[in-house]
Image (spheres, rainbow, N blue to C red):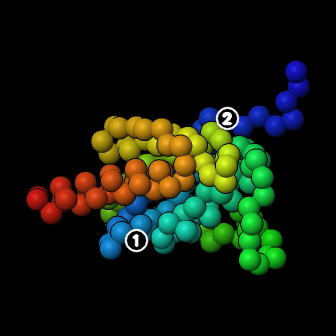
Amino acid sequence: MEFEKFVSEAMKTSTIKVTSYDDKIICGFIENPNLEAALPFRGCPWLISILDTLQDALDFPQKTFKLRSFADTPSPTLEALEKVEQKPGQKIIASFRVSIFYRQNASWQGRIVWDDQARSSSFRSTMELIMLMDSALSCGAAENDKG
């Protein structure tokens, strides 16, 4: 069997570094071996858009169908996304490694690792991924308030 394009596990895994989580608005940057520099994000829609664009660029995992849109604008490319270097002294409050194995039923399925607590979980949808990150960040915020 011949493979047209092999995508290694490391290339499929993105690291999400969270720098703030005020009023449940997640901010930070995404690192991936396919990127020349980290990509900043502010809010879940931006985070999801960047991760989806990365998967489209890799063509892995492939979508099971095309998503609907109100606009006839083309999907963003990796080159069109703003890149940023991490600022020295910028505090990272949480770090997650996300591997997306499937993009089925207009959602994602994969695994998330919360690096700070060495905990991991599978997720069955994009919403579940967001809820897992929220639970970790809310737990971390509560611990920071106690300290």
The quadrant in which the C terminus is found is bottom left
Q: Percent position (x, y) of residue 91?
A: 33, 63
Is residue 7 something one can see in this rendering?
Answer: yes
Q: Quadrant of residue 82?
A: bottom right
Q: Nearer the viewer, mark 1 or mark 2?
A: 1
Counting other residues with Cα less than 10 Å from the Cα at mark 1, is it few (<14), some (14-19), or many (20 or more)?
few
Kind of residue indicated by mark 2: Ser
Q: Percent position (x, y) of residue 137?
A: 32, 57
Residue with the mark numbered 1 = 25
Residue with the mark numbered 2 = 8
What residue do we see at 74% from left, 49% from top? 63
Which residue in the rendered view is the most extreme toward the left? 146
Q: Which of these two is toward me, 145 or 85?
A: 145
Q: What secondary structure is marked by label 2? A: loop
Counting other residues with Cα less than 10 Å from the Cα at mark 2, is it few (<14), some (14-19), or many (20 or more)?
few
Residue 10 lies, with reference to residue 41, above or below; the image says above
Is residue 70 shown left or right of residue 33?
right
Q: Percent position (x, y) of residue 36?
A: 64, 57
Kind of residue indicated by mark 1: Ile
Which residue in the rendered view is the most extreme toward the bottom? 71
The quadrant in which the N terminus is found is top right
Is residue 136 shown left or right of residue 72?
left
What residue do we see at 56% from left, 69% from top? 46
Q: Percent position (x, y) of residue 116?
A: 32, 45
Is residue 16 something one can see in this rendering?
Answer: no
- Mark 1–mark 2 distance (CA, rounded to whole Å): 31 Å
Q: Which of these two is toward me, 15 or 49?
A: 49
Q: What secondary structure is marked by label 1? A: strand
What residue do we see at 25% from left, 54% from top? 139
